[in-house]
Image: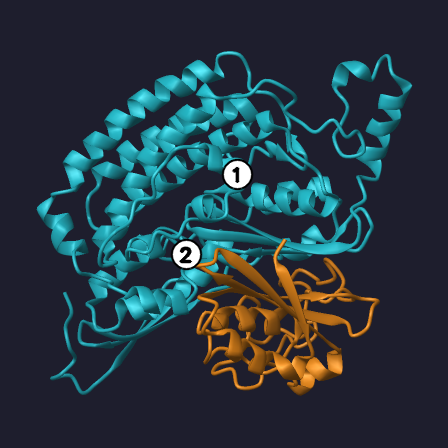
Chain colours: A cyan, B orange
Amino acid sequence: MSATADTHDELLTLNIGPQHPATHGVLRLKCTLAGEVVIDVEPIVGYVHTGIEKSCEDHQYWKVVTFVERMDYLSYYFNSLAYCMSVEHLLGEEVPRRAQYLRVAHLELNRIASHLFWLGTSILDLGAMSPVFYALRERDQVLDLFEMSGGQRMHPRYFQVGGVIEDIPPGWETKVREFLVEMSERIDQYEDLLDRNEILLQRLKNVGVVPEKRLLELGITGPLLRASGNPWDLRKAMPYCSYDEFDFRIPVGTIGDNYDRYRVRMAEMRESLKIVEQALDGLPEGPFMTTNRKIALPPRNELATSMESLIHHFKLVTEGFRVPAGEAYVAIESPRGEMGCFVLADGSSKPARVHMRDPSFNNLQMVPDMCRGAYLADLIASVACLDPILGGVDR
Amino acid sequence: MPETLELAPGEVREAVASLRADWDMLLSVHGCDYLPAEPRLGVHYELISMTRLERLHVKTRLTIEQAEAGELHSVVDIYPSANAHEREVFDFFGVRFTGHPDLKRILMPDDYVGYPQRRDFPVGGEPVLFTFNEHETPRWYE
């Protein structure tokens, strides 16, 4: 629904945030309003800038994983994967196939968790209280799985340069399969609740439309671009981490309004379920970490008997591994779009620069295009459907 | 790994303009500091073609003086996606993009002094402001 400013001569500047529950973090929106109609809006970021990129320069490569995970705090596996792949590229290190499959399973579970959190909070912004409880209930189950495999619910530091830190524990696979069955029913329930809900339709249909051409100009990727009908997905277009071995489809929308964005994310969760199942079915045997002892910590049981392992362990923990000088930009498909990681190595054991191309940071540029000429209430809905994570924006 | 195109700072704008027709999106502009090598600063552009499924990496190197004199031109009018990214490079490395519509700090506070991602900028050198030490901190009265 678009409206025009006609009878209003006086413009009002309204400040929303930075501390406001509807901005999904500490985002500040400077709105220029004519009555209830948004004439212009300027997103202002930087309120949770913690200098993570700078801190990374002061830590060894294997310790940086901990930092980068805390950038986009809802898709931590994606942060660490982008970084690890960048470093692996500089090292010229091949990751074992079992590790790749384990990575894919965790990535897709993380994508589901991230979309669930988005679903709950966005629908809450539209005024519906209950979906947030349902969505967080399922997200909690995913976090339980993460806790089981990596030891922590969030930021588990499970992906390492060269593989994953531990093999999955016994019983994890069964738990994941149970979750997949349950989750599939849950998505049906959400869709029954929401897909044809009168209020939701009125609030989302034809709101926040941005044409595909403009999205490309603005460098928008992820579900936002796919909602406008462009099937761009790095998992298909430039497969990494053996995604080319999986059978899944890319959901796309038609006109790129907020309803399409909602539908695309719901459909993506279903595709993710399929990918996780395939990853478990086809999980190859073999090592879960590279056997190159210059990079990977030796197994704990070797330390008591092998002098060489003890030396490797000592060198890795005190000094870290050295990465040959060079630079790499590696991009993966995060729940919000292209997550790129640029690493500049100077030959020492600490990176000279780690830069994350965070999708939310770039995607926030489309807020003015989504909201111009719409009502203020639709601005809240549009920002919610944009799904920015301010931890990733500000880093 | 994608092809790399290394250019002088003065050529970047023209080159990017000529690449516009072939490359659909400019995904990222980021800076880095090659200290102690000269020219010190680097600015990287990541282009992508959605039909050929290719990436192109455009890279330029410039000295601190060149960066602050504005020898590198903005590409915002060619690829609007560069807007926030160029502001970030300016914020952290002090590269003044000539022709940028609104070049101001994006992540650091507006009144911040210095360019914190440069390699000679110390990590954790800033005093934490409390009531007892705010008078000793430079520019507290501003």
The residue that mark 2 highlights is: A221
Q: Position of residue A354 (x, y in %)?
A: 66, 54
Please state the chain letter of the residue tagged with numbered disc 1 in the rendered image: A
Residue B71 placement (x, y as % from top left) = 66, 85
Q: Nearer the viewer, mark 1 or mark 2?
A: 2
Q: Is residue B103 above or below residue A351?
A: below
Report whether A89 appears left or right of A19.
Answer: right
Would residue A22 be visible to someone looking at this image? no
Q: Residue at x 30, y 35 (%)?
A: A135
> Is circle 1 on the same chain as circle 2?
yes
SS under mark 2: loop
- Disc 1 residue type? Tyr
The kind of residue on which mark 2 rests is Thr
Residue underneath mark 1: A77
For marks 1 and 2, the one nearer the N-term is 1
Quadrant in the picture for residue A325:
bottom right
Residue A316 % position (x, y): 81, 34
Q: Vertical placement of B15 versus A182: above or below?
A: below
Answer whether residue A319 is visible to the viewer in this image.
Answer: yes
Q: Is residue A158 left or right of residue A193?
A: right
Q: Quadrant of residue A314?
A: top right
Quarter that holds the C terminus of chain B: bottom right
Is A326 left, or right, of A169 in this rendering? right
Q: Vertical placement of B75 versus A326: above or below?
A: below
